């Protein structure tokens, strides 16, 4: 598990109605990033492209969330979930991510993720739910209600 440090409690909210996009190769190396991903992550496009996607991993994210994501994608299925990402400056931003395999001629050639803002009232609930998962006090993350 990659432990990106330091972290601060400064949040950058994702603007309503806008989308953060990235695409990876089969190993999770970033191959495309839109302007909002560059802006929110605080990394330049040059730093993002060619880097593993765990560059933006936040240490508050439970390992189980990414195991779930990779399990779905490798099985050819989409995955949706809430992700707290770390900015280059140590701050963070919450997203609701919809990730899916990219297929060319029926073959999976990479993965992509489209992310949007998270309602403010949900964030404290996600913080405490993910804390419980990290501390091993619950086994599953439910994003249903
Ligand atoms: C299309 C795609 C998008 C991803 N987006 C993120 C992301 O926004 N934040 C993140 O921490 N991991 C993201 N990941 C998962 C990372 O590849 C990685 O599994 C995760 O950061 C955990 O890394 P670690 O096991 O090295 O700690 C994404 C993976 C794929 C395939």
Image (cartoon, grey):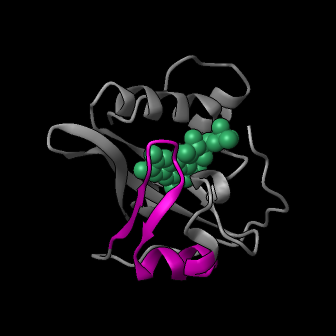
- Above or below — where is 96 with respect to 145? below
- Indicate the position of residue 37 as horizontal and vertical percent values: 48, 73
Which of these two is toward me, 70 or 7? 70
Q: Quadrant of the N terminus?
A: top right
Q: Quadrant of the C terminus?
A: top left
Left or right of 33 in this view: 89: right
Residue 123 falls within the magenta-colored stretch = no
Residue 22 falls within the magenta-colored stretch = yes
- Indicate the position of residue 15 as horizontal and vertical percent values: 40, 79
Residue 27 visible in the displayed image: yes
Which of these two is toward me, 40 or 54? 54
Residue occupying the point 66% across, 58% down: 55
Residue stretch rendered in magenta on the structure: 19-46
- Indicate the position of residue 141 as horizontal and vertical percent values: 48, 28
Left or right of 80 in this view: 44: right
- Indicate the position of residue 81 as horizontal and vertical percent values: 40, 43
Left or right of 47 in this view: 82: left
Which residue is situated farthest in the left direction here? 105
- Above or below — where is 23 with respect to 33? above
Residue occupying the point 43% across, 82% down: 35
């Amino acid at each position: 598990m990659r432990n990106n440090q330091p972290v601060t409690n400064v949040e950058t909210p994702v603007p309503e109605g806008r989308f953060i996009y990235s695409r990876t190769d089969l190993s999770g190396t970033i191959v495309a990033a839109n302007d909002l991903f560059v802006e929110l992550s605080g990394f330049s496009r040059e730093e993002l492209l060619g880097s593993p996607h765990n560059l933006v991993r936040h240490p508050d994210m439970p390992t189980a969330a990414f195991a779930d994501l990779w399990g779905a994608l490798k099985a050819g299925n989409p995955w949706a979930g809430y992700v707290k990402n770390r900015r280059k400056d140590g701050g963070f931003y919450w997203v609701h991510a919809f990730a899916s395999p990219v297929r060319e001629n029926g073959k999976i050639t990479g993965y992509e993720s489209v992310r949007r803002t998270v309602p403010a009232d949900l964030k404290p609930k996600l913080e405490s739910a993910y804390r419980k998962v990290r501390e091993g006090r619950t086994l599953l993350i439910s994003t249903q209600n």
